């Protein structure tokens, strides 16, 4: 059973690295027959992973987008890269900083000790960048609406107002 579970995780990892794999290539990578590969694909489907297959002896396999977010299989480099990206995520979107911190905490909890040590050694201290403006964070709904409009090539009209500036104070004697 442990061998089958390990092979299923290895198959999942391979499916996440490419758009499409041929059945014979996957079977060779896993060191199994095409029949065993098909059983392993069925196991992944039963676990909720949407694996799409074309028919025939030379079928191809691809991991599709699902309706739920399934568990991901990451290698060490990917986990470290994600943790660094989460540490440096922008704070200009309302609520994103908290979500990034929670995701980083979740990822750190499941990391093996050597990877956790590597992430801790490369911990990023964020400081305000000169190009960041002191404006209120953007609501996610606004960001989604703008992104949707851009994705559908809709014309956007923006209205703005001049920034309020405090009048200059005379120097103190």
Image (tube, grey):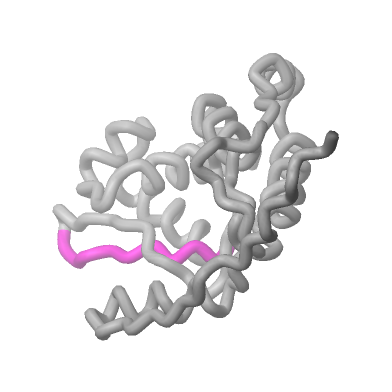
Q: Nearer the viewer, residue 143 or 14?
A: 143
Q: Quadrant of residue 82?
A: top right
Residue at 24 percent of width and 52 percent of height: 20
Horizontal and vertical percent position of residue 121: 69, 15
Figure check: 65 above or below 13 = below
Give the dominant element type of the magenta stretch: helix, strand or loop.
loop
Residue at 45 percent of width and 81 percent of height: 145
Residue at 28 percent of width and 64 percent of height: 53
Q: Would residue 109 be found to the left or right of residue 89 on screen?
A: right
Horizontal and vertical percent position of residue 136: 66, 64
Horizontal and vertical percent position of residue 163: 56, 66
Q: Would residue 108 be found to the left or right of residue 150 on screen?
A: right
Residue that sits furthest to the front in the current view:
173
Horizontal and vertical percent position of residue 138: 59, 68
Residue at 31 percent of width and 57 percent of height: 62
Task: Report the magenta residues as a range.
Answer: 46-56
Q: Is residue 44 magenta?
A: no
């Amino acid at each position: 059973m442990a061998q089958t579970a390990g092979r299923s995780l290895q198959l999942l990892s391979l499916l996440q690295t490419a758009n499409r794999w041929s059945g014979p290539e996957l079977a060779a990578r896993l060191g199994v027959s095409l029949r065993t590969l098909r059983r392993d694909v069925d196991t992944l489907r039963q676990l909720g992973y949407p694996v799409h297959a074309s028919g025939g002896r030379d079928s191809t396999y691809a991991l599709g987008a699902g309706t739920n977010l399934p568990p991901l299989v990451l290698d060490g480099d990917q986990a470290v890269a994600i943790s660094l990206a989460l540490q440096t995520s922008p704070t200009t979107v309302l609520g994103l900083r908290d979500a990034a911190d929670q995701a980083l905490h979740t990822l750190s909890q499941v990391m093996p000790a050597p990877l956790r040590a590597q992430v801790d050694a490369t911990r990023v201290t964020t400081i305000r960048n000169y190009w960041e403006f002191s404006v209120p964070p953007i609501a996610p709904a606004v960001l989604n609406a703008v992104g949707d409009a851009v994705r559908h090539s809709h014309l956007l009209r923006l209205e703005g107002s001049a920034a309020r500036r405090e009048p200059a104070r005379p120097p103190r004697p």
